[in-house]
Amino acid sequence: MIGVRHSADPSPDDRDRRPRRRLIVRVLALAVAALCLYLLAPTIGEVFSAWRRLGQVHPAWMVPAVLCAVASFACIWVVQAVALGTRDWFAVITSQLAANAFNRVTPGGGATGTALQATMLSTAGIDAARAATALTAQSLLSTASLVALPVFCIPFVIAGTQIPHGLIASIWIGIPVFVLMVVIGLSVFAFDAPLRRLGCWIAAIRRRLGKRAIDGVELGAHLLQSRDAILREIGPRWKMAVGVSVLRWLFEYGVIVSTLYGLGTRPDPALTLLAFAAASVLGLLPFTPGGLGFVEVGLTGTLALAGVSGGNALVTTLVYRLLTFWLPLPIGAAAWFVFRRRYPPPRRDDAASAEQAARDATTSSR
């Protein structure tokens, strides 16, 4: 494995400025999140006000809704395990649940969750660069699959399904975004230059954030090694990885459909899929944790465009967010606790003893 060479220590002036920069960035991120939540608070409150109507959902339809939510998480675990080339399901599942929960309570999109999961996987014995590259590959596949969902509605449009203007726009938005994601994925996995440049960018960002400086050229070479290892693992099974990535979103779509059927509504499959895809894309916006507020506004609005009554749209949105956003929070916290029980952080005395043993072994070998 290629090592990462640390550059010279920053000057005292740089060390003084970097904490201020980090503080300014964090304050701005929190301010943006607070502003978005303030503006979207009425809709969030309206969705939670539908709590009293949860009893109107037939219990028999809640079973497939819950199973679909669990299956959507299982799809993520499968793709990550394939990309990582591991069968350590305990590490994959617990780290993903913990990282997902952490991402839901911190602004910044998936970056915070990815960083936490990569750290946990590294603690479990998986190479950190390999973990970061694998999680990036899984995220690209997931996003590309999501924006590709409206493409599945094209046959319904050709067959004569009348789609409202507000929903049909998601098809024309989804197609170019899907093409863009394919281009990005191909460029990363077919050419070396993007990852070499990424290594330099990461090194530059670390310097700006005041973290310990690293050599961007060597980091890029390390990322290339990790990418090649992932290609060897995922290459023969790329069809399964792509299929499971699409299936993940279809299972979440199943939560919506099951809830609507439980409310006695017979939704149009194409219109409901478009509504779900459009709202889920809003959930990718990094301004609030887990797209909080944006998904509520988007899903209730697009379901109304799909012909669902306002009350049923609120209840469906509440059930969907409970199963995919709120309930995974305590589950993720429990997963983090269980993971730490199996992989406790090394104590300082143990780390010092290991370092001394390594030095002794080096001295004796000489």
Image (cartoon, grey):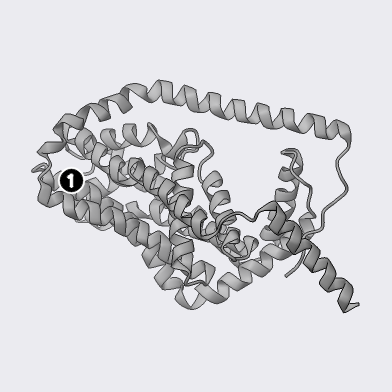
**Towards the viewer: 114 or 305:** 114
Q: Residue at x 45, y 25 (%)?
A: 36
Q: Residue at x 88, y 37 (%)?
A: 11
Indicate left or right for 209 with 242 as reference: right
| Whether residue 250 is visible | no
Image quarter of the N terminus: bottom right
Element type at mark 1: helix
Indicate left or right for 328 with 8 as reference: left
What is the x, y in percent for residue 8? 88, 48
**Towards the viewer: 365 or 268:** 365
| Whether residue 22 is visible | yes
Q: Image height check: is 171 above or below 318?
A: below
**Residue at the far right in the pictured view:** 366
* Label 1, residues with CA under 10 Å away: few <14, some 14-19, many ≥20: many
Quarter location, residue 259: top left
Q: Residue at x 61, y 72 (%)?
A: 229
What is the x, y in percent for residue 353? 75, 61
Image quarter of the C terminus: bottom right
What is the x, y in percent for residue 285? 47, 38
Quarter location, residue 222: bottom right
Q: Which residue is mark 1?
A: 259
**Towards the viewer: 292 or 211:** 211
Q: Image height check: is 346 above or below 85?
A: above
Kind of residue sitting beneath label 1: Thr
Q: Image height check: is 287 above or below 93?
A: above
What is the x, y in percent for residue 240? 40, 71
Query: How many discs appear?
Result: 1
